[in-house]
Image (spheres, grey):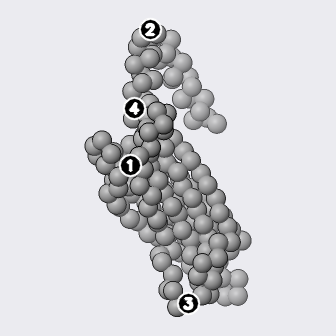
Amino acid sequence: MRKLFIFLTIFITIVSSLGAEDIEKVLRMLEEKALKVHITARVIENGDVSVWDMDISKITISGKTVNVRLRGEDVLVYANITPYTEGDDSILLVAQGQVWINSPDTEQVKYKSTIKSLPITAGEKVLFYPLGVADPNRMDIVTIELAIEVTPYYKIMSGSTE
């Protein structure tokens, strides 16, 4: 809440010192630089049964991280997704995940950290597995899957998402 107050104070100060034409330029520039990050998180058991789903969309800019927190009974996942624009439709996507798994029978907590970077095209959907990909021969393993899609905001506003 404090960050929002500070942002609004700075924004109001800047806007009050600008003319209408300057404000329009600033808003247009923000719209041109903004990115929409859409994440669909799924927890999969027994190889292909989705036991939990979540959708989240956030607006960000190049280099600004989108944080996702998933909390289950015995698992806690933090995912940090950072898009970096590298041209018209080229984006470097950096996905970092931290996972804590509590084993109730052994009372131990296991920790796993993952980081992946991948060049993508705007609008392309990629999958990130903070726990890695489960062995298809083992059905007793839980898989956490994040489907990530980054789209320039101006394409969404214009209706052009190809």
Mark 3 or 1: the one toward you: 1
Contact between marks 4 and 1 (CB within 8 A): the answer is: no
Tell me which amino acid carries mark 2.
Gly
Q: CA distance from mark 3 to mark 1?
A: 35 Å
Residue 38 percent coordinates (x, y): 52, 51
Find disc 3 in the rendering and name its residue: 138
Q: Residues within 10 Å of mark 1 (few under 14, many from 20)?
A: many
Mark 4 or 1: the one toward you: 1
Find disc 4 in the rendering and name its residue: 32
Tell me which amino acid carries mark 1.
Ala
Contact between marks 1 and 2 (CB within 8 A): the answer is: no
Residue 87 percent coordinates (x, y): 28, 43
Q: What residue is at 60 percent from the left and 29 percent from the top?
A: 5
Q: CA distance from mark 4 to mark 2?
A: 20 Å
Find disc 1 in the rendering and name its residue: 122
Q: Earlier in the sequence, mark 4 or mark 1?
A: 4
Q: CA distance from mark 4 to mark 3?
A: 46 Å
